Image (cartoon, grey):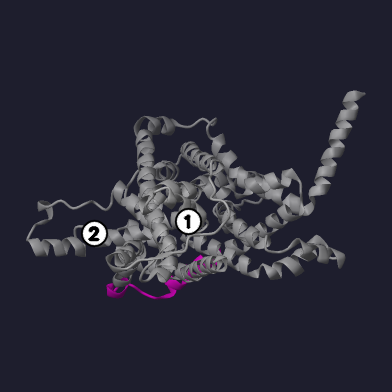
C-alpha cells in the first residue's frame, strides 16, 4: 500500500511538473536534448568496435596529436593574453592619440578568420613572396643561403590564431578594468605601489575572471580550428578527425578522436569555472579616470595598440586586396554570386532560427521557476564549447541511423528506393549551426530581456494578455535591438564557420569559406583571395557597428559615474 501511494505521488508530481513547465519549458527541454545528442553520440563511440584504424592511430599519430594540440593551446594562450590584456589596460586607463578610434578598432581582427589570415601571410612570407624576394634583392643572397622563419608551421598557426582571437581577451579584460574601483587603486597607491605595482598586484588579480574567460573562449576556438592547422599541415585532433573520417573512411575512429577532443574542451570549461568561482571583486563601482599621456609615452601606447590591428587585420586585408586586383583570373561572375547567395541563405536561416529559439529559452527562464527548465537552459548553451568537427561527427551518427531506418521502412512497406534524407542536407547543417552558435544568440537576447521591467509583464497580464501574446506584443518590440544584434553575431559566426560546413554541406553546395579553403588547399592562393576578401568585407560591416556601439556604451557609462 505504501509503495502504491508513493508511486501515485511520483506520477502526480511528474504530471504537475510537466503542466507547470508548459510549452516554453518543453522547448527548453527539447533544445537541451538536441544539444546533448551529438555529445552522447560521440562518447558512445568509445564502446563501439573499431577496425584496425584506431589501433594504428593510437600507436602512431595520437601522441603527435596530443603534443601539437597542447603546444598550440599554450602558444595561443600566451599570445592572446599578452596582446589582449596589454591593449585593454592602455585604452582603458590612459588617453593618447587615436585612443577613441583604437577602442573599437581593436575588435576588427574578429572579421578576419584565422584560416584567411593564414592564406594571406603564406603568400606574403613564402620563399617566392614579396618579403623574401625583397630580402634577396637587398642582400644578394640565394634561397638556401639564409634562414627565414617558416610560416606554415605550428608557431605560424599559433601566430595566426593569436592575431584573430585576442579580441576575446581584449573585450572581457577591458570590461573588467572599467569596473574596477577607484578607491582600490588609491589605497594601493597610498601603500606605495607605483604604476606597474598597481597593475600586477591590483588590476590583474581583480580582472582575472574576465581574462580567464576571454582566454578560455579563444582556446576553445583554437581547439575548434580546422582551416588554419589543415592548411599549415599541423597535425592536431581536428585534422585527425577529418583524416580518419574522410580519408580513411572510419567514422568510429573519427568519433573516438572526437571524444579525446571533448576531454580537452571539458577540462578547459572546468578550469574557467573554477577561476570564476575564485573571483575577486573591487567593491562599489567608481572607476579610475583615464590618465593623459604625452610625448614618447603617448605615441608608444598608440603604436603598441595599433600593432595587433595591423597584423590581425590591415596587413592581411591589404594582401588579399592586392591579390584580387592584380590577378587576371579573378572573375566577379555568376559563380561568385552563387557563393554569396549560398552563404547568405545559410547564415540568414541559422541566424533567424537561433534568435527565435534563444528568445523562447530566455522567456522560459524569465517566466518559469522550474529548476528543470533552468537546468535545461544551462545545457542548451553548452554547444559553443563544442568544436565544429565534434558536432559534425556527433550529428551524423544519429542522422545516419534515422536515415537508414526510414530507407528500410520505405523499401519494406512501399517499395520505394530512397537516398539519404537528412544526412548531407541543409536541415542537418542548420542543426549543427544551432548547436554551435545558440549560445551567442541566447546571451545577447537574455541581456536584452533583463532590460524589460517586471511591471510590463504585470501590466500585460492585467490586460488579459497570455504569455505568448505578451512575448510577441510587448517584449519582442522592446527587444528589437538586442535581437538584431544577436542575429548579426550569429550571421557572422556562421559565415566564417568552416569545419561543420566542410563536413556536412550538401553535395555541390559551396560557400565563400569552402571556396576559399579549397582554392588555398590547391595552392591557388591568388584565386582564393576574392572569396576570402568578400567574406571579410561582409563580416566587417556588422562588426564595426557593434564594436563602436560597445565602445560608446562604455564611455557613456563611465561619464555617467563621473
- The residue sitting at the front extreme is 190
Residue in front for this viewpoint, 215 or 429: 215
Q: Single out the mark in the foreground, 2 or 1.
A: 1
The residue pinned by badge 1 equals: 177
Identify the residue shown where x is 50% and y is 40%. Answer: 271
Identify the residue shown where x is 73% and y is 43%. Answer: 372
Residue 241: x, y in percent? 44, 43
Identify the residue shown where x is 28% and y is 51%. Answer: 152
- The residue sitting at the right extreme is 1
Residue 191: x, y in percent? 42, 47
Task: Answer whether residue 339 is magenta in the image.
Answer: yes
Residue 180 shows in the view: no
Q: Classify mark 2: residues with Cα within 10 Å, few (<14), some (14-19) or many (20+).
A: some
Tell me: residue 319, above or below residue 254: below
Q: What stretch is highlighted in magenta?
A: 324-346
Q: Quadrant of the C terminus?
A: bottom right
Residue 21 shows in the view: yes
Residue 125: x, y in percent? 23, 59
Residue 265: x, y in percent? 49, 42
**Secondary structure beneath disc 1?**
helix
Residue in front for this viewpoint, 393 or 457: 457
Task: Answer whether residue 258 is magenta in the image.
Answer: no
- The numbered mark, 2 or 1, whose residue comes first in the sequence reads 2
Left or right, residue 438 beside residue 224: right
Q: Mark 2 and mark 1: span between their CA atoms? A: 37 Å
Left or right, residue 316 beside residue 508: left
**Secondary structure beneath disc 2?**
helix
The residue pinned by badge 2 equals: 125
Amino acid at each position: 500500500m505504501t509503495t502504491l501511494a508513493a508511486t501515485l505521488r511520483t506520477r502526480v508530481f511528474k504530471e504537475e511538473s510537466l503542466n507547470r513547465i508548459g510549452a516554453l519549458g518543453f522547448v527548453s527541454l527539447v533544445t537541451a536534448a538536441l544539444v546533448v545528442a551529438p555529445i552522447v553520440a560521440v562518447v558512445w563511440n568509445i564502446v563501439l568496435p573499431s577496425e584496425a584504424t584506431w589501433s594504428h592511430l593510437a600507436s602512431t599519430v595520437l601522441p603527435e596529436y596530443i603534443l601539437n594540440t597542447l603546444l598550440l593551446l599554450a602558444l595561443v594562450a600566451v599570445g592572446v593574453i599578452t596582446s589582449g590584456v596589454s591593449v585593454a589596460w592602455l585604452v582603458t586607463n590612459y588617453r593618447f592619440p587615436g585612443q577613441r578610434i583604437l577602442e573599437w578598432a581593436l575588435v576588427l581582427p574578429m572579421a578576419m578568420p584565422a584560416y584567411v589570415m593564414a592564406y594571406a601571410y603564406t603568400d606574403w612570407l613564402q620563399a617566392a613572396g614579396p618579403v623574401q624576394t625583397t630580402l634577396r634583392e637587398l642582400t644578394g643572397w640565394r634561397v638556401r643561403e639564409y634562414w627565414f622563419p617558416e610560416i606554415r608551421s605550428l608557431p605560424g598557426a599559433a601566430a595566426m590564431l593569436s592575431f584573430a582571437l585576442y579580441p576575446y581577451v581584449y573585450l572581457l579584460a577591458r570590461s573588467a578594468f572599467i569596473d574596477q574601483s577607484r578607491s582600490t587603486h588609491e589605497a594601493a597607491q597610498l601603500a606605495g605601489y607605483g604604476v606597474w605595482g598597481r597593475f600586477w598586484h591590483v588590476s590583474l588579480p581583480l580582472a582575472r575572471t574576465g581574462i580567464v574567460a576571454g582566454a578560455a573562449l579563444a582556446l576553445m576556438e583554437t581547439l575548434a580550428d580546422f582551416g588554419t592547422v589543415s592548411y599549415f599541415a599541423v597535425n592536431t585532433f581536428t585534422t585527425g578527425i577529418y583524416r580518419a573520417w574522410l580519408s580513411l573512411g572510419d567514422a568510429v575512429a573519427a568519433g573516438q578522436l572526437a571524444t579525446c577532443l571533448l576531454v580537452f574542451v571539458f577540462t578547459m570549461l572546468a578550469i574557467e569555472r573554477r577561476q570564476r568561482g575564485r573571483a575577486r571583486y573591487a567593491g562599489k563601482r567608481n572607476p579610475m579616470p583615464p590618465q593623459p599621456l604625452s610625448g614618447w609615452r603617448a605615441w608608444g601606447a598608440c603604436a603598441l595598440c595599433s600593432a595587433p590591428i595591423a597584423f590581425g587585420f590591415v596587413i592581411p586585408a591589404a594582401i588579399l586586396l592586392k591579390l584580387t586586383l592584380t590577378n587576371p583570373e579573378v572573375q566577379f561572375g555568376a559563380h561568385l554570386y552563387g557563393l554569396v547567395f549560398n552563404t547568405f541563405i545559410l547564415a540568414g536561416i541559422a541566424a533567424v532560427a537561433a534568435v527565435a529559439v534563444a528568445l523562447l529559452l530566455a522567456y522560459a527562464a524569465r517566466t518559469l521557476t522550474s529548476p528543470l527548465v533552468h537546468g535545461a537552459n544551462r545545457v542548451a548553451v553548452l554547444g559553443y564549447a563544442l568544436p565544429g568537427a565534434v558536432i559534425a561527427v556527433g550529428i551524423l551518427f544519429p542522422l545516419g541511423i534515422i536515415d537508414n531506418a526510414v530507407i528500410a521502412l520505405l523499401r519494406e512497406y512501399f517499395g520505394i528506393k530512397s537516398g539519404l534524407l537528412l544526412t548531407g542536407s541543409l536541415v542537418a547543417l542548420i542543426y549543427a549551426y544551432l548547436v554551435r552558435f545558440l549560445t551567442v544568440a541566447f546571451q545577447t537576447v537574455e541581456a536584452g530581456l533583463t532590460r524589460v521591467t517586471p511591471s510590463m509583464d504585470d501590466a500585460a497580464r492585467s490586460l488579459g494578455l497570455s504569455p505568448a501574446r505578451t512575448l510577441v506584443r510587448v517584449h519582442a518590440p522592446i527587444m528589437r535591438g538586442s535581437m538584431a544584434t544577436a542575429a548579426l553575431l550569429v550571421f557572422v559566426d556562421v559565415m566564417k564557420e568552416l569545419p561543420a560546413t566542410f563536413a556536412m554541406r550538401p553535395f555541390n553546395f559551396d560557400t565563400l569559406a569552402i571556396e576559399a579553403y579549397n582554392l588555398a588547399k590547391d595552392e591557388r592562393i591568388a584565386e582564393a583571395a576574392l572569396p576570402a576578401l568578400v567574406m571579410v568585407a561582409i563580416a566587417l560591416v556588422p562588426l564595426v557597428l557593434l564594436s563602436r556601439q560597445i565602445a560608446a556604451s562604455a564611455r557613456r557609462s563611465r561619464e555617467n559615474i563621473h
